[in-house]
Image (cartoon, rainbow, N blue to C red):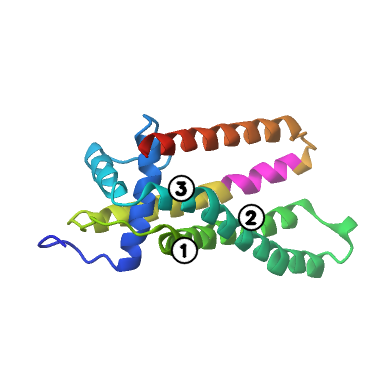
């Protein structure tokens, strides 16, 4: 570590490497991610950090391990916490009230996103490195601790925004019986397009 550089633990270093590779996949293709903005100097540093992570390891983490870890954790929260809470509050499903239903679902989403991000970045990256290799050449610099703290703050902020918008949005959907089919279909198509785009970007990096 460079002289005067703040201490960044091994786990944080690993998470920063994977997050940098994730953001470089976006920045390198000329795109930006709303809510996750960085200065030109930070982008250059993240691009340099991303190069220390083997593309095979990153692809394994992005397309296989991360979805598996997050889906497993979200399913455990729904089955182990949300469903029992709903059954306790509303033994008769016909008596379910929209607002308590939405609030419980938002709480489950908050927990799933918070723990899911930690699990994907910590457990997922550990598994990916052990399966695909750690690479070499990463040397922490003075600004890396601040960059890591900024990314962590951004993700916490995004989680709160998502859950904050979810509650009134879902409640209005239920109250006014809004048909969400076309919107859901559009979101699925956008998600598929983003996955294909990121895959193409990863292919170009190899």
Which residue is under mark 1? 127
Q: Is residue 170 magenta?
A: yes
Q: Position of residue 87 (x, y in %)?
A: 81, 67
Residue 4: quarter of image: bottom left
Residue ranking furthest to the left: 3
Q: Name the residue: 86% across, 66% down.
A: 91
Looking at the rendered structure, which numbered label has been put on residue 156? none
> Which span is picked out in magenta?
164-173
Cα gap from disc 2 to disc 1, whole angstroms:
29 Å
Looking at the rendered structure, which numbered label has been put on residue 59? 3
Q: Is 99 in front, or is 108? A: 108
Cα gap from disc 3 to disc 1, whole angstroms:
12 Å
Q: Position of residue 61 (x, y in %)?
A: 47, 53
Q: Is 41 in front, or is 201? A: 201
Q: Is 109 in front, or is 76? A: 76
Which quadrant would the N terminus be assigned to in this image?
A: bottom left
> Count of labels shown?
3
Residue 170: quarter of image: top right
Q: Secondary structure at mark 1?
A: helix
Q: Name the residue: 26% across, 57% down.
A: 136
Q: Is residue 117 magenta?
A: no
Which quadrant would the C terminus be assigned to in this image?
A: top left
Task: Give the overall secondary structure of the magenta segment.
Answer: helix
Which residue is under mark 2? 106
Cα gap from disc 2 to disc 3, whole angstroms:
30 Å
- Is 151 on the left-hand or right-hand side of 75? left
- Number of residues whose C-alpha sits closer than 10 Å to that of mark 1, classed few (under 14), some (14–19) or many (20 or more): some
Q: Decide: marks 2, 3 in contact (CB < 8 A)?
A: no
Q: Name the residue: 71% across, 46% down.
A: 171
- Is 9 on the left-hand or right-hand side of 33? left
Q: Is 42 in front, or is 178? A: 42
Q: Decide: marks 2, 1 in contact (CB < 8 A)?
A: no
């Amino acid at each position: 570590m460079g002289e005067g550089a703040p201490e960044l633990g091994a786990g944080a270093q690993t998470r920063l490497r994977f997050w940098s590779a994730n953001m470089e996949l976006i920045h390198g293709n000329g795109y930006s991610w709303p809510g996750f903005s960085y200065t030109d100097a930070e982008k250059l540093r993240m691009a340099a950090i991303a190069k220390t992570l083997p593309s095979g390891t990153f692809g394994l983490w992005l397309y296989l391990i991360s979805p598996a870890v997050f889906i497993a954790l979200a399913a455990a929260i729904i089955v182990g916490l949300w469903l029992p809470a709903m059954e306790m509050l509303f033994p008769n499903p016909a008596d379910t009230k929209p607002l308590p239903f939405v609030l419980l679902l938002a709480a489950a989403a908050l927990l799933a996103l918070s723990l899911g991000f930690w699990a994907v970045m910590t457990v997922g990256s550990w598994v990916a490195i052990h399966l695909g290799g750690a690479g070499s050449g990463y040397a922490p610099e003075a600004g890396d601790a601040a960059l890591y703290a900024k990314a962590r703050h951004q993700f916490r902020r995004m989680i709160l925004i998502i859950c904050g918008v979810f509650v009134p949005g879902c409640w209005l959907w239920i109250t006014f019986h809004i048909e969400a089919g076309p919107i859901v279909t559009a979101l699925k198509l956008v998600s598929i397009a983003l996955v294909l785009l990121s895959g193409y970007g990863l292919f170009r990096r190899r």
